[in-house]
């Protein structure tokens, strides 16, 4: 279906300029790589998630703040799945720094998933502080 959509987009290109329809601009390699990172995070495959994230690192300028904050939470969760608490918390905190400026239930869902992945470290002071931060700044229940 995706291939068909791309073929139709080529057919909708402005014949005089070769420009593709505006809706296709959202779908670029970095965006699809970011989506793959999320899929592999969901599949509990942090190695693949982090590899796809490297490909997504070149997302074009002008991406939405919400997208950046969500991606940080997604990749932070992959680091937690790989048992890397320090890097995970670093990305989780950067995510919250960004997401406090937006209103998005989808973004909050990603932070909630991050919090769930913190379960093995619940007794760690830094984890308790992070959970408290998400509760007070984003209204996310642990």
Image (cartoon, helix red, strand yellow):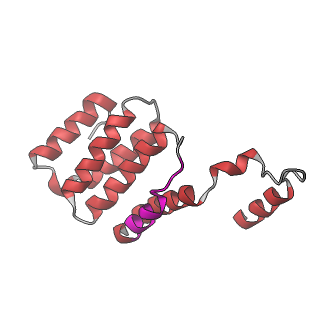
Out of 58 and 104, give the one closest to the viewer.
58
Residue visible at 32% across and 54% down in the picture: 76
Out of 19 and 78, give the one closest to the viewer.
19
Residue visible at 40% across and 39% down in the picture: 108
Q: Quadrant of residue 54?
A: bottom left
For the magenta stretch, what is the residue range? 48-60
Whole-percent x, y for residue 131 in the image: 22, 40
Residue 117 visible in rendering: yes
Q: Is residue 21 left or right of residue 123?
A: right
Principal secondary structure, stretch drawn in magenta: helix
Give the quarter of the figure containing the C terminus.
top left
Q: Residue furthest front?
A: 17
Residue 115 visible in rendering: no
Q: Is residue 142 left or right of residue 103?
A: left
Whole-percent x, y for residue 74 in the image: 39, 53
Out of 106 and 94, give the one closest to the viewer.
94
Q: Is residue 9 left or right of residue 56?
A: right
Q: Is residue 55 magenta?
A: yes
Give the quarter of the figure containing the N terminus.
bottom right
Residue visible at 32% across and 35% down in the picture: 97
Whole-percent x, y for residue 61 in the image: 52, 44
């Amino acid at each position: 279906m995706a291939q068909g959509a791309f073929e139709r987009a080529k057919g909708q290109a402005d014949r005089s300029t070769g420009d593709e329809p505006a809706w296709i601009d959202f779908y670029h390699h970095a965006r699809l790589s970011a989506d793959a990172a999320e899929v592999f995070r969901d599949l509990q495959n942090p190695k693949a998630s982090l590899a796809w994230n490297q490909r997504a690192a070149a997302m074009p300028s002008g991406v939405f703040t919400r997208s950046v904050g969500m991606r940080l939470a997604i990749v932070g969760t992959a680091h937690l799945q790989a048992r890397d608490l320090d890097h995970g918390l670093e990305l989780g905190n950067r995510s919250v720094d960004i997401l406090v400026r937006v209103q998005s239930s989808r973004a909050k869902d990603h932070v909630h998933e991050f919090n769930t992945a913190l379960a093995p470290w619940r007794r760690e002071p830094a984890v308790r502080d992070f959970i408290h931060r998400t509760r007070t700044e984003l209204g996310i229940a642990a």
